[in-house]
Image: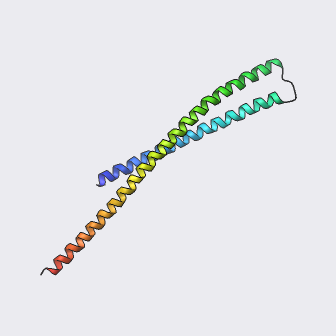
Amino acid sequence: MKSKDRKIRRIAAVQARLHRIAEWQLMECQAKESELDDRRRRIIEGFNDDTKLPELMAQVAGRSLRAASVEHGVVTKTRQRLAAQARDEARKLKQVLRKVHLLAGRAIREQEKRILEDEIDKSVSVEQP
């Protein structure tokens, strides 16, 4: 039983680590998405500025805006995939933790049963002269 308990606890530790990694990757992706939003906002603010941009600068800014938008789309899809992965890892972790809890409860009940049986054996042996 201890071997099974040890294995389940190790699986729980690995699952917790995988969950932390998935959350970390999701946070990195969200930071990248926020960075791209800021970049697009600054470019658009440059277009909305009262001063007219020279033609060449406007073209460069337009290409930069297009590239940032495309990259933002890719990052958004990646973020959605990572969010789904983080939810899956959280679900798996929760399942493993339930198993650990059940095993711990079972071990406690078995220990209590052994103690009770020992006490019964002691009381029976004392009564038999």
When asked about the image quadrant of residue 68, the answer is top right
58 relative position to 30: left or right: right
Please report the residue visible at 63 percent of the width from the left and 38 percent of the height from the top.
31
The answer to whether residue 98 is above or below residue 34 is below
Picture residue at 72% right of the left edge, 31% below the top: 40
Above or below, 80 relative to 19: above
State which quarter of the image contains the C terminus. bottom left
Q: Say which quadrant the N terminus sits in.
A: bottom left
Q: Using residue 102 as the reference point, say whether residue 127 is left or right of it.
A: left
Farthest-out residue, top? 56
- Residue at 45% over, 50% down: 94
6 and 102: which is toward the camera: 102
Q: Is residue 93 above or below residue 105?
A: above
Residue 84, given in percent of the width and then of the height, sits at: 52, 39
The quadrant holding residue 103 is: bottom left
- Identify the image's colour scheme: rainbow, by chain, secondary structure or one colour: rainbow
Given the current orientation, which residue lies at the most extreme left position? 129
Q: Looking at the picture, how far across and down is residue 11, in whole percent? A: 39, 47
- Looking at the image, residue 113 lies above or below residue 14: below
Q: Residue at x 84, y 20 (%)?
A: 54
| Relative image position of residue 52 (x, y in whole percent) | 86, 24
Q: Name the one closer to the observer, 28 or 41.
A: 41
Image coordinates of residue 42 in percent, x first then y, are 76, 32
Say how many tags the image has: 0
Left/right of residue 69 with respect to residue 126 in the rendered view: right
